[in-house]
Amino acid sequence: MASAASSSSTKSSSSSSSHSITKSSIPVLIAGAGPVGLFEAYLLTKLGIPVRIVERELAISPLSKALGLQPRSMEIMQITGLIDKFLARGQPLYNFNFYFGTKHMATMPLLSSNTRDTHYGYGLFMEQAITSEILVEELKTMGVKVDHGWELLDTKVVEEEEEVHQDFIGSENKKQRKTFVETTIRRALSGDNTTKDEQLILGGVDPFAEQPGKAYETQVVRSDYLVAADGGRSTVRHKLNIAFPGETLKFKTMMWDGTFECDLKFKEVMFVNGNNRKTMVAFPLTNGSTRIAFEAGEMQPDEDFAETIKDLTIEKFEEGASAIIGTPFKIKTTEWLTMFKVNERRAEHFVYKNRVFLAGDAAHVHSPSGGQGMNTGIMDAHNLAWKLALVINGLASESLLETYEEREAMADRAIKLSHKLLVKSRKNNFLSMLIKRIYYTMGPLINKMMRFFSGPPEVAMLKVRYHENTINKPHATQPIPSNDDYRVGVRAQDGSLYPTMSTNDEKNEITTLRLHELTAGIGRFHILVFTSDMLALNNSEPRSINGIKTTNVKALESNIDSHIRQWRSKWSYASAMHDGYDDKDLFKIHIIAGSLSIGQDSNDNSESLDQLIRKQKGDGKAFLDESEELHQKYGFAWKKGHGGIVVIRPDSHIGYRVNGTGDQAWKDVEEYLSSFLAA
């Protein structure tokens, strides 16, 4: 599949001899080839959706703003088949080191929780450029390349009426409204697209600001949808007049990448509190260099920030670093020296006429504190891709795309968290410094005591929850769970499972697997059937527990088989799927049993249980929750319970849950699915 694949293409000449104009079409155009745009392209291509991704820059920038993946992003990479590539190139980050000047005060864990919360109980340190390289390499293997050197000049949503011819004699032709996105892009045929003194602050590129004597190629791209991942200065957002409210903070930060000489040995990630009451943070980069950033004062009312950056020198950086550390800091080589100020802004809305979608920095910008930026953008892409695929495949109406707005609250969360961390790090009055000293002294002991009792910190992004909408639906009549951990909208938690064996299987060693391994994929719904101890053969007759009817092995097998047949005949992908499965099924069903027993008798229940154990993964195969962990995490009793069914969305969030696994529970699940899927 080529990145510039089109259903139609024509060429014409413009009034200027310096231009060649091409018209083309593609289902999804992606503006911006940073990690967010690249990940969106990867997901859609895996889902069989043709994409074109355009990028103004001529190559991946070696200057990385983001420096790694949070645990939730690592879970997403595992679910979507990429985690091994990232683990091979990144460095696990477990601890932070805290200093006062040159004195080491404490080594603190990145996460205060134990690995029960996630398989990835650490951060993965890796420059943004490497993240982009991995994704570019994956796209190349699938026949998709980034179209570098193309700048976006304009975009608009177009509505047209077209005649629909009737097949029967005597009928009048009807008209229907067709909507699409029309985007104008341009590239210089030699060199890059930059112009002298160009203004990018508003995200706009003047289509008439051409370099004299240069030849350009212009294209008009028609797409069904446009994903704007074109950064904080988003041209798409600007051209569509989508407001970007927020504020620019008065803080300035000086940042440098390179090698140095200093008496203080830098190791892992370091936070240094200086005697001058300024703070520094240092990160070891994978190429052997170090990134150092520190406070550079506040913006003055009459300050020209562009001139401030021009006046920045290596000597000024050395002076500032030495003052904080309290010992001479000498730069040997420099890869990047800059200064930045923090914008905290969020687009007024992420969805424009159900045709254009803002993602990543185009939708939200904030402080780098807490490492939320790129990770939030990755989750934007993960949330959007499967919804686009369902609509393009005719499996859902376009109204499903409106639910991408659930990402807006997540952007607000990231802005609030990063602001809190930024302000906290810059509180350097006497009392604040005293509190820091006490905390660094007592912190390791506190963390050792609390690590098995506390939840993960907010920065891990494991507690992200979407609000109720058409795909996050509480049950109509059953009570909403009191525990937020398993309400609709939350991230689907991970845990250990054991494959089950039939009496006729050879007694080979059984290895555990994780639920997230079982529910991997790009665009599949995973239906988890929690059965408590109902698959024990002595529980042959259904009973009622708290008004909820239980089931037995034979009835459960019948419900699974009948619903698999019905749902797969009604809902399946038309596009090619490349996510590890050999089919195009929209649903995968998994039984999670609290306990079960394998009988020697050839009665109906024993035969049905044997069938469930022997099923293929995703077809209703039974797995054992021997430790009780998953029943507990999803809010069901492991023993003497009524069980329940949980629907996991393709982006690994809970969409629906119902108590019970009998006939009515399956009808409720089908009603939920039918509420947003097209028949």
Image (cartoon, rainbow, N blue to C red):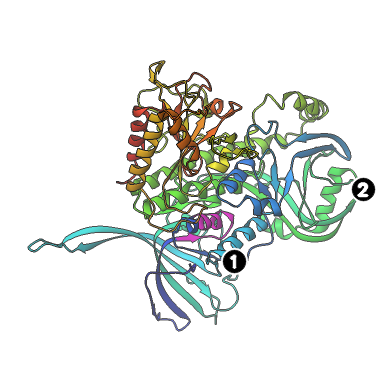
Which SS type dominates the magenta stretch?
Answer: helix
Residue 42: x and y in percent read 53, 57
Residue 216: x and y in percent read 50, 77
Snapshot quadrant of residue 61: bottom right
> Among all residues in the image, which is located at the extreme left?
170
Residue 623: x and y in percent read 53, 35
Snapshot quadrant of residue 499: top right
Secondary structure at numbered mark 1: loop
The residue closer to the viewer here, 239 or 487, is 487
Neighbourhood count class around disc 1 (C-alpha, 10 Å): few under 14, some 14–19, many 20 upward: some
Q: Which mark is residue 57?
A: 1
Residue 366 in view here: no
Q: Mark 2 points at which residue?
A: 263
The residue closer to the viewer here, 646 or 189, is 646
Figure check: 322 above or below 492: below
Magenta range:
29-43
Residue 652: x and y in percent read 51, 41
Residue located 50% across and 50% down the image? 522
Tell me which amino acid carries mark 2: Asp
> Among all residues in the image, which is located at the extreme top?
546
